[in-house]
Amino acid sequence: MNVKVWCEAENKAFLESEIAYYLDRVFGAAMISCAKTEADLEFRVTEETGMDHIQITMAHGKGVIKSNSVVGLLIAVYRFFHEFGVYYIRPGRKNEVVKKQTEEDFQQKMLAIDETASFRHRGVCIEGADSYENLKDFIDWLPKIGMNSFFIQFENPYSFFKRWYTHEFNPYAEAEPFSTEIAQQLSDKIDAEMLKRGVVHHRVGHGWTGEVLGFSSKYGWESGLTLPEDKKPLVAELGGKRELFDTAPILTSLDFANPEVGNRMTQLIVDYAKARKDVDYLHVWLSDARNNICECEKCRKEIPSDQYIRILNQLDEALTKEGLDTKICFLLYHELLFAPQTEKLNHPERFTMMFAPITRTFEMSYADVDYAHGIPEAKPYVRNQIVLPNSLEENLSYLFAWQKMFDGDSFVYDYPLGRAHYGDLGYMKISSVIYRDIKFLKNLHLNGYISCQELRAGFPHNFPNYVMGHMLWNNTRSYEELKAEYFGSMYGEDWQTVTKYLENLSAYSSCDYFNAIGDRLNPVLSARYDVCVNLAQDMLAVIEKNTTETTGQQKAEWKNLGYHREYVVKLAAALGLISAGQNEAAQKQWRDVLDFIRRNEMCFQQNLDVYRVIEVAKNYAGFRL
């Protein structure tokens, strides 16, 4: 079977390679490039503007697939092949489920799809420990599940690559060659992967405060450094001293009453924007710490958000003088949750507001809040004495206060797969919360969602991200339909047995407990963790049966579920002990968890971020390294 194809897009070569690959995988067909008048399938980017929009029509073996953006056309291509039975269940082509089709299937297919994305911003931000392959596969996966954006924190992904290639926290693995130069080479390759897909490019975030002091943002949370004497006037005064906060530039706040700080920061950002015109949204954030705001006499006269807005206006003016239309993302986070009292953005059309409720609970959704009676007045700012809220109600009070002074483009920058998911042993509660959050998002007047998360968040499955992508594309999808589509392709005939098991694990575990929300001593939760152990032990026979009887990708998934079952037995036992107050016994059990995930990391490398689960366990859940 031969299929004649005509393409018109900026990324034509890449697009044709993808079309050829899936024509071969699905139909065993060869793709032949041809003139438009001879084509069986026509692929093109239209000149229409606005939200990503796709149109797919097909009848009698002739089809037209088009979109108004480069990434939109790629989304349409993957959607086209999904209609023929391709399921993109995890990052990486090897993890796709493909149902073979015939030439007759191709000829008889009737399609009439005309859809516009529900939200403008649909993406993920890098966290955790990642190899180049992890990052490349994840970016490749984004348009397959309807997403259009990727955010690389800092100047490049050095911090995230370093954690993986040095195998931090895993003494069983040998460190691999790694350097600043290697990180930059890999970063350049990742930029090329984003560009050829038309993925909307977000960049930097934290780090500008360190850049002002002469420290590169590429090193992320680097610490143990000393501030030169000549830079001390630029740094926040705390307790009468001006030093790096916890010896880390990224955590250090500045003296924003000093005009040299604003001038330096503005020039650094303008220079970056001039050099990196491939960056669509440049994130300008302050330090990644709280209660470290300058206490000098001048700074005490205003709150940090007013100083922040003044610098953003200075930046806007400088970018305009340079003729740069770079979009700037500003952040509602830590002290910046508190809305400005006097300042406003002069040209709000340049800016996108990003609401980042990093300490929120994930045991409930935005949809569960009592908006008529439950939203308090936003608390007044008290310098260096803030306590970040866990409740959605208080977090939203800060968002609503900001929205009174800014009604421009905005999205939520949320963290369901950044820490909380490790506490959800079945990943089903977190999937449901993501679904309901996104379904409710327009009620909050937010135009999208970027998830700050580990890329290796698929243990035992990637349903949370699958739900996220599909709901951001079409927020009317049914949760039950998504569940059947995903798990049916992943596990085959016994998929409902698996989902019932996973939902029970989720019901008896806690996102919040692992994330240090709530009392550490919790006998009720301890008993529930015992139930999780029993559930996982009882699942062994089902996993053994299906691992034996299935083939291909489904066999691989059942095998992965087997590793996850053993992980649950060990981790739930440790959590049961620590929540019962049996701390020493819990630490011994945790050693068994550590041994298991370290020793077997390469068996489930893409699915579980061993570095990050250990980091979260020691910083939040109460376990020792």
Image (spheres, rainbow, N blue to C red):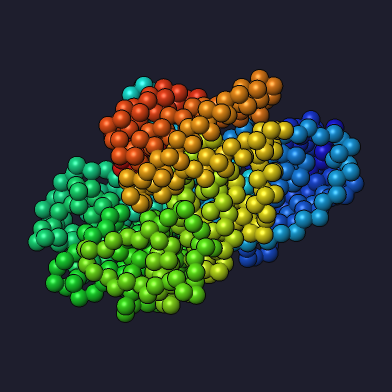
Which image quarter holds the C terminus?
top left
Instruction: Answer left or right for 229 relative to 539.
Output: left
| Between 224 and 390, the one nearer to me in the picture | 390
Residue 178 location, quadrant: top left
Spot occupied by residue 45 in the image (x, y as percentages of width and height): 69, 55
Q: In which quarter of the image is residue 328?
A: bottom left
Q: Which residue is drawn at 45% across and 57% down?
A: 413
Pick out the residue farthest to the left: 240
Name above or below for residue 245 compared with residue 532. below
Q: Position of residue 519 (x, y in %)?
A: 33, 50
Left or right: residue 232 versus residue 98 is: left
Residue 518 to residue 567: above or below:
below
Foreground: 411 or 204?
411
| Picture residue at 36% right of the left edge, 51% below the top | 517
Task: Residue at 46% x, 66% y: name it.
Answer: 352
Of residue 338 and residue 325, the one placed in the foreground of this image is 338
The answer to whether residue 144 is above or below residue 599 is below
Q: Is residue 517 visible?
A: yes
| Position in image of residue 371 (x %, y %) | 49, 71
Q: Which residue lies furthest to the top in this view?
A: 548
